[in-house]
Amino acid sequence: MHSPALWDWEPGKRVILASTDLPEGAMWMEEAHASPDGQRLAALARLEDGTFTAFVNGSLWENTFEKAWLPRFSPDGRFTTVVQQDGEWTLAVDDVPWEERFDYLWGTQFSKDGSVIAACIQSGGEYGMCIDGTPWENLFENLNQSLLSADGSSSTAVVQLNSLKPADLDAFQAGVFGVAVDGQAWDRKFLNAWTPTFDASGRRVAAQVRTSLYEYTIAVDGTPWPDMYACVWEPSFNPSTGSVVAPVRISGLWGMAQEGKTLWEPVFFQCWQQAFSRNGQILAAIVAPVFGEFTVAVNGKPWNARFPVVTDLALADDGGLVAALGSDNNRNWRVMVDGKVWDGTWDMAWKPVLSPKGGNVAVKVERGGRQTVVVNGRPLDQDFERVFDPVFSPDGTKLLVKAMNMGAYIRVVTPVA
């Protein structure tokens, strides 16, 4: 599939599928998925003979499988699903299974442009990752928290490096977990490790680690920060400077540390899910200035709007916009942009989508069982049975809406203005 700049951005409505009814020979279909450019709709289907396949734009795949699950479109528009054949598992990509077979496979991931596909595997009782059908050379006793770098050049995961007997507390406290990058484990072992994260280049990795029963810190390329904390959350790399930041708990309150030094003073009851703008100038995070009241802090300064729940933080590439969702304990969802709360409440809302240029914000929302998109605070004129994630054109002047309504799947391009 072409890059977004080469998609069809001609304004207007186009019916991609006039009917999404069951195809002949199918017993039932699962939830449908739309390709990023909106040109394809796909779903897994169970056939009358008990096998599974995919249904894409009205046609069934030629291959069938014993089982199929985790259907996903890659960013470049390929439809993928985890499949089982002859008791073994692999990944099928646009009806072509990987040649390699495994005892189990799960957790499909994609590079940012979709050109690289990764998954977690289990083979012979050992675990690792598989990149475009090629497994890691080294496999491990356990693996979780896997991640593919944005450019697809590297992969990482938390791995178990030593066996543990039942209730062997001494061995656990000596450290049995670490982080592996492309199948090569760090030299250092920890009691626990979580959320390995790549830098912008895909070469450096940072992770949360537990160094003793009561001490936590961040390790970068296997080297822990010198300072220890009561707790830490997932680290992030500044995309401009390469420095590492992470929320840390000090004396019962949360702040933000950078390279082990205090960046935001520990004044919050919670601080997490931070995100940088692409230029590294803006750092935002979800915080609780008061117990039970959440908001967003931008470069350490919290917004005035407060909610019992705040989630789905999103930043524009240039940091010019910061958006998030707030709700009253998962009811009456509101949209916040740069500290201001949009009019209107919704039964449900999804993560805000920010335009690459132009300072526009679109949010998929639901009310009364019908879905639509709110753009810069104003809902579209029409609602639908289901809406997929909206997409802005690269110049930010148009919005792509992919939706299902009255049994049809449609693709709508509308000017943002």
Image (spheres, rainbow, N blue to C red):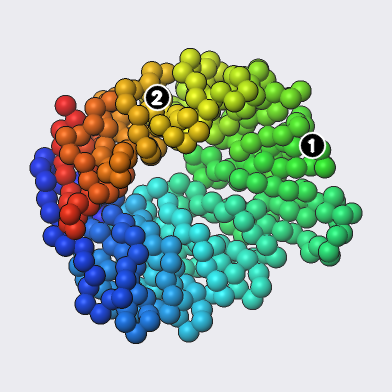
Image coords of residue 196 (percent x, y) = 60, 46
| Crowd rating for badge 1 (residues with CA inside 10 Å; few <14, some 14–19, many 20+) | some
Image coords of residue 27 (percent x, y) = 31, 76
Amino acid type at circle 1 is Glu
Image coords of residue 336 (percent x, y) = 39, 24
Judge from the rendering whether residue 30 lies leftward or rightward of residue 187; answer left or right. Answer: left
Question: Which residue is labeled 2 in the image?
Answer: 336
Residue 215 shows which numbered tag? 1
Residue 89 seen in this snapshot: yes
Q: Residue furthest front?
A: 368
**Image quadrant in which the C terminus is located:** top left
Tell which tag, 1 or 2, sits nearer the viewer. Answer: 2
* Residue 96 vs residue 88, the one in the foreground: 88
Position of residue 333 relative to residue 28, above or below, is above
Position of residue 336 relative to residue 87, above or below, is above
Residue 384 shows which numbered tag? none
Position of residue 381 relative to residue 255, above or below, is below
Image coords of residue 9 (percent x, y) = 15, 42
- Residue that appears at 44% across and 34% down: 331
Q: Quadrant of residue 322?
A: top left
